[in-house]
Image: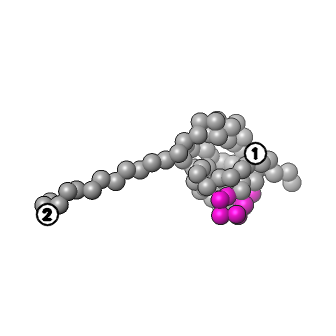
Amino acid sequence: MNGQPQQSVEYVSSYDPYVYQTLTSIIGKNIVVQLSNNSAVQGVLSQVLPDHIVVEKNKTPFFIRTQQIIWVSPAYS
């Protein structure tokens, strides 16, 4: 455009098919998710996509990037 080379942007996402498959098998279950920022989210796993999951607590959805997940465990009330 202005005589300078145009920069390209590349989006790279980590996709782990084993994590994806395991999480899809527990949709609808109450879980605890430990995140990389040392916080935890507990609620019902409502949706699993290749790059993120949705955990609902008190009808509020939490969108969590798969790359931020350290571990997932069943939550027992």
**For residue 35, what is the image quadrant?**
bottom right
Residue 55: give x, y in percent of width and height: 67, 53
Q: Which residues are magenta?
A: 35-43
**Which one is nearer the viewer's eye here, 3 or 29?**
3
Horizontally, residue 12 falls left or right of residue 60, namely left
Location of mark 2 (residue): 2
Q: How would you rate the neighbour count of disc 1 (Cα within 10 Å): few for under 14, some for 14-19, many for 20 or more?
A: some
Spatial CA distance of label 2 from label 1 is 55 Å
How many marks the image carries: the answer is: 2
Location of mark 1 (residue): 29
The local secondary structure at tag 1 comes to: loop
Residue 11: give x, y in percent of width and height: 41, 50
**For residue 41, what is the image quadrant?**
bottom right
- Say which quadrant the N terminus sits in: bottom left
The local secondary structure at tag 2 comes to: loop
The question of residue 41 being in magenta is answered with yes
Q: Residue at x 65, y 59 (%)?
A: 36
Q: Is residue 24 above or below residue 60?
A: above
